[in-house]
Amino acid sequence: MRIPKRLSHEWSLALTALSVVFVLSGSVFAAGGTQKLVIANDCPIALWIHFTETPYTAPINGAAAKKMNPMDTLIYDSLPNFGSGRCWAYYHDPGTKTSQGAPLIPENGFVEMTVSGGANGVQNYNISCVDYATLPVKVVGASPSCIPTIIPVTFKEMQYQLKHGCPTQVNFFDSTLGIGICLGSYDYCVQPGYDTGNIYCNKMWLGHHHHGTEVYGGSLNPGSPNSLFDSIAAWQRGTFYQDADSADYWKKPEQDSTGKWVNPYNLYAKWIHKTMNAQVYAFANDDHQNQSGFQACTNCGQLNITWCPCENGCADDVLAATKAANFTPVVRLQDEKFIRYTLFAPNGKTIRTGVATSMEEVSRAISNKLSLSRGVYFIALYGKDGALAATKKMLATW
């Protein structure tokens, strides 16, 4: 491996400047959303698309499902406002059922979004696998600044994963289609008797001594302290409190040499994030340390949803989503001081992470202790609450 002799002069100047302005990087988000939805079915099977809204305003397609054959596209334009909603894709025909706020049948996958009218402002969207995982999907705003969130596997790979990789339980499996739903850890473990009678679930109690259903990855009470939210997120990932380095997640052994559960974690979340490389919600508070793929995109008048997006490749989307998990800046208070930095390679891999309170400390740590190949790297700075504070590119020369 070739070793750079120095960091670029531009980066040296940027380090000094960034110590003053890093809290200002990012944009202030206003209310708004999209007025247009474009749904594509790239799956090799027929799907039935259905929308639900909260609060209810006016039904899309009469609150019924619309059939999409492979390679079909649906476009809904000039939509009415609604604060939040879901796009459901069913792999079985739900018939003539209608619903404004609930799924029609359980054989489905879904994405979440807001539709607030107008092209200005923010479009929020995410993919949730908290309850279960089924069809691959990508969702992205049409604005150039929008970042995709994606389950980046082919339909065939998802068939294989559901049959051989799901660490919990597959329900509603169709042997002809090769598709079912793999239960999330929470939905799996809240079944009667599973908390103590199923080792997959009971290990979380034994290892963390926390007797609440959130230990499996379910929602916490709104009044819970922030420390508990972060602790639960860390337990799901098999790491320690406030660890923002994704390279540490699901890395340690769950049991010691005697068989005692010392570091149990959410195998379902590992399957979603590591095996399928999906930057999506795998448990309720997976947005801690920015791992959920949640996006808030400005000036977005259109939202594109593609089911089975990787049938012809999706490497660029995967790279963009990986970078977004580490480099999407958020506005910080002027007096907020970061406590952690992380250096990422161009492919999103963590190179180094550490604790610092000034850009001078970061500069010294990188200059004195790292040997980098030539290329563009990224620095991410995290505040005291673990949230991303700012980002900066770094060029390493020979």
Image (cartoon, grey):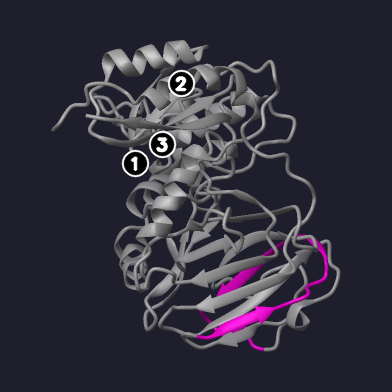
Q: Position of residue 154 (x, y in %)?
A: 36, 69
Secondary structure beneath label 2: helix
Mark 2 or mark 1, which has the lower sequence index?
2
Residue wearing tag 2: 13
Please name the residue shown 50% across and 51% down the image.
280
Q: Is residue 362 above or below residue 32?
A: above
Q: Amino acid at mark 1?
A: Pro
Please name the residue shown 66% across and 67% down the image.
302
Residue wearing tag 1: 346
Secondary structure beneath label 1: loop
Disc 3 versus disc 2: distance between alpha carbons?
42 Å
Left or right of 115? Residue 149 is left
Q: Amino acid at mark 3?
A: Tyr
Q: Is residue 327 above or below residue 97?
A: above
Viewer-proximal residue among 155 and 10: 10
The C terminus - image quarter: top left
Q: Position of residue 397 (x, y in %)?
A: 27, 30
Viewer-proximal residue among 356 and 43: 356
Magenta includes 54?
no
Left or right of 136? Residue 285 is right
The N terminus - image quarter: top left
Residue wearing tag 3: 265
Disc 2 versus disc 1: distance between alpha carbons?
21 Å
Mark 3 or mark 1, which has the lower sequence index?
3
Magenta span: 72-95
**Looking at the image, do the residues carrying marks 2 and 1 touch, with CB atoms under 8 Å apart?**
no
Q: Amino acid at mark 2?
A: Leu
Q: Position of residue 312 (x, y in %)?
A: 35, 73
Q: Is residue 239 above or below residue 201?
A: above
